[in-house]
Amino acid sequence: MLKNVLPLLALVALPVFAKPVLTVYTYDSFSADWGPGPVVKKAFEADCNCELKFVALEDGVSLLNRLRMEGKNSKADVV
């Protein structure tokens, strides 16, 4: 019985220890390797103890269009 319960407890406990993810919609030149995004990401993650996920879009127009299409169902926490 204990062999059956331990894996279940492990699955339930994993989200408790997972870092929260902050999703940021941005344009691709910000999040590119040569842009400021990687430096900002590293510093922010160290400060907030969370994971920063950039969703890079081609430009500001693409970003706004995506937000309009997603509406209230947007996955973005920050734009």
Image (cartoon, rainbow, N blue to C red):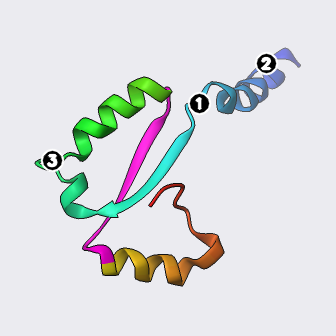
Instruction: Describe the element under mark 3 as helix, strand or loop.
Output: loop
Amino acid marked by disc 2: Lys
9 left or right, relative to 43: right
Instruction: Describe the element under mark 2 as helix, strand or loop.
Output: helix
Is there a contact, CB below 8 Å, between mark 2 and mark 1?
no
Who's the residue at 41% across and 31% down the image?
Answer: 45
Q: Nearer the viewer, mark 3 or mark 1?
A: 3
23 left or right, relative to 5: left
Q: Nearer the viewer, mark 2 or mark 1?
A: 1
Q: Identify the mark nearer the N-term, 2 or 3.
A: 2
Res 79 → quadrant:
bottom left
For the residues marked 2 and 1, what is the alpha-carbon distance in whole angstroms? 24 Å
Q: Position of residue 33 (x, y in %)?
A: 15, 47
Q: Which residues are magenta?
A: 49-60
Q: Is residue 27 above or below residue 53?
A: below
Q: Position of residue 41 (x, y in %)?
A: 33, 38
Who's the residue at 79% across and 18% down the image?
Answer: 3
Q: Which mark is residue 3?
A: 2
**Residue linked to disc 3:** 33
For the residues marked 3 and 1, what is the alpha-carbon distance in whole angstroms? 26 Å
Disc 3 crowd, CA 10 A, few/some/many (<14, 14-19, 20+): few
Amino acid marked by disc 3: Asp
For the residues marked 2 and 3, what is the alpha-carbon distance in whole angstroms? 46 Å
**Residue linked to disc 1:** 18
Q: Identify the mark nearer the N-term, 3 or 1.
A: 1
Q: Position of residue 23 (x, y in %)?
A: 48, 52
Q: Nearer the viewer, mark 2 or mark 3?
A: 3
31 left or right, relative to 62: left
Q: Position of residue 10 (x, y in %)?
A: 71, 24
Q: Is residue 48 above or below residue 25?
A: above
| Residue farthest top in this picture | 2
